Amino acid sequence: MTATTEELSGDGEVRLKTGEIVLINGRRLITGNLIGGVRTFTDANDPRQDVSYTQSAINAMTKDRRLLIEGRCHDLPDHVRDALTRALKSYNDEELAYMDRALIYCKDIDKIGTRLRLTKKGLSPTIAKTAERIKDKTPWQWNTVRKLYSRWITSGRDPRSLLPGWSDRGNRKRRKDNWVHEFAKDFLNRNWLVNTAPKISWLKPRFLKALAAKATDLGVATPEIGKNFLYRKAGEYEEYTKLYHRHSARDADSAIRDVGMGPQGDFAGEVYEIDHTPLDIMVRDDKSGLVLPKPFLTVVLDRFSRLIVGFCISFHPPSWLTTMLALKMALGNKEIYLAQFSGINGPWPDTGAPLGFVCDRGKEFESSSMDAAILRTGAHILDLPRRRPDLKGKVEAFLDGLQEGTIHNLDGTTFRNIDERGEYLPSKNAIFSVHGIRWIVTKFIVDFYNQRPHAGMMNEIPLERWNESVEKYGRRPSVDEQLLTAFLGESAQSQADRRGIRIERLFYNSRKLANIRNKCAKLGAVTNPDEPVNVMLWRSRDLLNLGTIKVLDPISNSWISVECTWPTYAEGRTQRQHRITLDQLNAKGKRINEENLLAAMNAIHDEIDDIKAGVKRSGQMKDIARFEDTGPRPQDTIEPSQHDPTASIHPISEGLGARTTRVLRSKAATPKYGPDARAETPSSRDAPKTGGPSDSEPTQAKPNTLPDGAETETANSGPEPNTIAREARTKAFQKIEDL
């Protein structure tokens, strides 16, 4: 195929060569012959298809950038081809001003069209008129304008082709020998890409000394090094390379990789996300007023609707215990939990069991108890890769919003770090109890977060999105309330013999358990009458109440309750309390029985009371808080038969004392704390030893109860028992409303 000899002509028209590849509307075509003012193009992929255009149509398509000449685009300078692939925002103001100036000249020439020849005689008058119109004192020469115009036409009138190639100018060759650059790179690899990351100013004299020694070994003169040479070599390293060598490949990947929105979910109740965090606030004990450590928060969030379906606040660090409590709230009846508080107005729907749970690689999520609980609820676990919090970023975002928007505005907050805290003293300003913090978090979730527009869902409201999805697709069924403890307890296989099931030196036995052993023995081989009948059974234990366990009957596939053989000690006892009591007896070498266990438990409570009363000093308030306060019992929030509707008016420590077996004894005096401390009630132990009526006659203690209709006034009429708690709660509620 013979090509024409015409190039881009000076008449402003696009001249194509026969056989040239062009792109018309993104379609690759082969240019044909020009016959009668019409040029035919053949499809490069299918020669049977062709299309024809007139010269005026070719000029119009080129002007609109719908026609590009593929071969001539490759003939453009390198900086022009690079400019055609970049955005204009990547250039500085001087380069853009150069492009705008050249574009004015090119457009004026393009307006004349075929009447103008691209010669000195043809271009000079147009250049002069344009320079006078835009007041250009130093106009370009005609050959410069011709090159710019040809480049502009060739690129399909793309203004980026007029950008200058200033960045490509200059001598790009190295001024120093290659061995100097290689030696500098090797020196930085060995001395700078390390964990300590020393400063270049500290390395520079050592580098010069090593460079001189290297030049001597090579038998050459020591090269002269500029003051910024080593800085420029260090600037050539990418951030990923520095993180990889100074830390690890995992840290480098975590810092550099892109983070998106993560999976969104298809309907409500499909996937729940679970995560833990310590709350940035210090709390006080209800009775003694001593400052307690920061509590931990475990949250369960629905991925599709962003609705919070359950949570747990406890002094225990993230563990299966806190996960169990949060899951019980998520899968159980929330009306019973909300009935414990006043001032919570918003609805909190029952959410039921999801199809799957998304959690990280924490030990509590990889335990056998978690696997058994998820299997029994009909769900599955979606384990995330390590160090990928972005894959469960919705619950992470909620925790950050709760901390920044609510917790950090309360008295006693520790803020996120010491820089934000400054000179603020959280221990001096702490006024909230853990019960008050639970009320604040519940209020924030139910009345604010679940019912306000969410920016991550185009300002949709989580509660409304949940209800719409449930109305359209239905809701997963809830787990039976009486089976939640069995489903979400600590699950394992244990051997049952004549003494029952032994767990941490406690035995559980009953007539029903003996019947299960009898039935399971019939299913196996004939046993020796001289040997006991032992079987392996699945059992589930509530870590907040060791008095009863649940045992799975493999015959009927149902759960039965088996009580501890030491009910006086075990009822209401938590696993942590039991383990501490066992450690006390083992340290003293005493025998493990119910009497010694009760005595050791009472001794521990006596020591805690002395610490709270100020008789003893101890820095172990974290251990004391975890020992006494383990969060609400599952029975208190799930089983209606054991629910106390007036529990919210009592401090949590009182409720804990009611569910543990202790010897009655006199309590230590309650010390004052804070500006609104309660007035102490006088007692016999506080009576003066000299002077007053106490010297002549003993003071009789007032009875705890009064006859019907009797009224009395106390000498020290301080605030009511929960006045401080109510004032603190009102203050927190006002802060939440102001957000």
Image: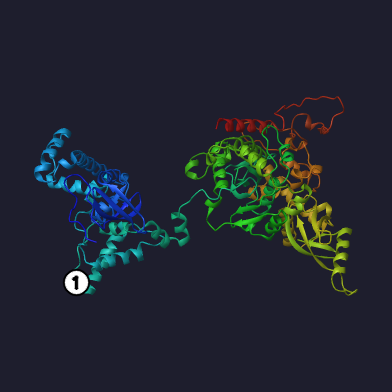
Instruction: Please tell me how many numbered marks the rendered image carries.
Output: 1
Image quarter in which the N terminus is found:
bottom left
Left or right position of 240 against 93: right
Residue at the outermost left position: 121
Q: Nearer the viewer, residue 64 or 398?
A: 64
682 vs 53: above or below: above
Q: Which of the 4 image quarters holds residue 678?
A: top right
Q: Nearer the viewer, residue 154 or 239?
A: 154
Question: Callout 1: few (<14), some (14-19), or many (20+) C-alpha neighbours within 10 Å?
Answer: few
Residue 174 seen in the figure: yes
- Estimate the x, y position of residue 109 in percent, counting from the top left: 18, 40
Most distant residue in the front direction? 36
**Residue 733 on image: x %, y %:** 61, 32
Residue 248 visible? The answer is no
On the image, the x and y values in percent for residue 281 come to: 58, 42
Q: Amino acid at mark 1?
A: Val
Residue that carries the numbered disc 1 in the rendered image: 220
Query: Residue at point 15% right, 40% down?
Result: 115
Quadrant for the C terminus in the image: top right
In the image, is residue 102 above or below residue 247? above
Question: What kind of colouring is applied to the model shown?
Answer: rainbow
